Image (cartoon, rainbow, N blue to C red):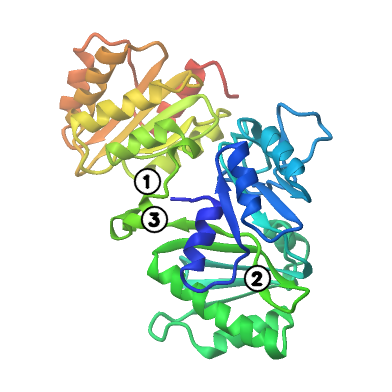
Amino acid sequence: MNIHEYQAKEVLRSFGVPVPQGFPAMTIEEAAEAAGRLPGPVYVVKAQIHAGGRGKGKFKELAADAKGGVRLAKSFVDIRADAAEMLGNTLVTLQTGAAGKQVNRLYVEDGSEIEKEFYLSLLIDRATSRVSFVVSTEGGMDIEQVAHDTPEKIVTFSVDPATGIMPHHGRRVAKALGLEGELAKQAHALTQKLYTAFIAKDMEMLEINPLIVSRGGALKCLDAKLGFDSNALARHPDIAAMRDETEEDAKEIEASKYDLSYIALDGSIGCMVNGAGLAMATMDIIKFYGAEPANFLDVGGGATAEKVTAAFKIITSDPNVKGILVNIFGGIMRCDVIAEGVIAAVKEVGLKVPLVVRLEGTNVELGKKIIGESGLNVIAADDLDDAARKIVKAVGGGH
């Protein structure tokens, strides 16, 4: 689960992490009131969406030369004007895609005088099963671009969970950023606080970009992006309360109610599969034959007919779906349960696009019999390759 920048800074502030003072705003008046609570004389008005690259983004409704989603303001008049332009309009960045995201919240923050900019993040390194730090002197830039152009400017190291954060980790961060004296001490303290917050709140990602040295000689987290392990939210009701469903795909929200692993994509072939690995393979072979999957969907190994029905309804609610591929290998999941769920869903929502079904495994003959006797216009497939060829051909795509 992701949260907004202002919420991320609220979380970090509770762990003693240095962040600029600021206040959220949902209206033009609240933006002006927020500025009135800050010392000024320079303010920063930031669009709050779950995507990076806001400063370089463009608003669909504004002229091409209009300012982006992060703006400096020197008066209340400027703040009101910026808030009026941003609120309710659609911001398009490299991370939002062409559709963009509507701005419903702003963050008005006290301006900072910047001497230097750095990059610092904590991530889960799945190769080592440890928390890893990623540190770079190239703050304020896309870290992916830094990694591509100048990988030598990125320093990474992991923390042994048996010892936790240690003094040498802070020294390593300071050295990587070229900090000495008082700033090195601040880097050491910041390293400890960020790691403590990461572990305490079951985060998956903590990114500070940029981490700055102010002209007053202080380290400060100028921007913050936090992501949390959704499976651990039951332990953190305070974090769960920060969820903004308007930033999420409605189909993904519906899928979460049935414990379905669903991610919306941009293609035209809806996929319903059991098992994450098989789902990935199904998506790959669809692309291999020249089409694009409309989603990732794993119904799980113990899905009920109700869950399958819900999954089918979610797939068909996507207007971009031109065909559906059901690919089930029945181990724990029985093929007859899948068949019953598909039939129930089709009867409830109708079937307006081609449907290819490939079943194999437990109760496969019964599953095929149920579908065969249902009277549905279903294209049967013998294996995954056959299924992919048939659904791609049915939607008129591929090669």
Picture quadrant where residue 288 is located? top right
Instruction: Using the image, tell me which numbered label, if any, was put on residue 80.
Output: none
**Residue 204: image location, x then y, percent:** 46, 61
Is label 2 in contact with label 1 (beta carbons under 8 Å)? no
Q: Amino acid at mark 3?
A: Ile
Instruction: Using the image, tell me which numbered label, if any, was put on residue 276.
Output: 1
Residue bearing the label numbered 3: 239
Residue bearing the label numbered 2: 220
Label 2, residues with CA under 10 Å away: few <14, some 14-19, many ≥20: many
Picture quadrant where residue 173 is located? bottom right
Is label 3 in contact with label 1 (beta carbons under 8 Å)? no
Q: Amino acid at mark 2?
A: Lys
Label 1, residues with CA under 10 Å away: few <14, some 14-19, many ≥20: some
Residue sitting at 37 percent across and 49 percent down? Answer: 241
Sequence-wise, the earlier of marks 3 and 2 is 2
Q: Quadrant of the C terminus?
A: top right
Q: Is residue 251 above or below residue 276?
A: above
Label 2 SS = strand
**Residue 112: image location, x then y, percent:** 73, 64
Q: Is residue 100 visible?
A: yes
**Residue 111: image location, x then y, percent:** 72, 59
| Residue closest to the far right | 65
**Alpha carbon distance from label 3 to label 1:** 27 Å
Sequence-wise, the earlier of marks 3 and 1 is 3
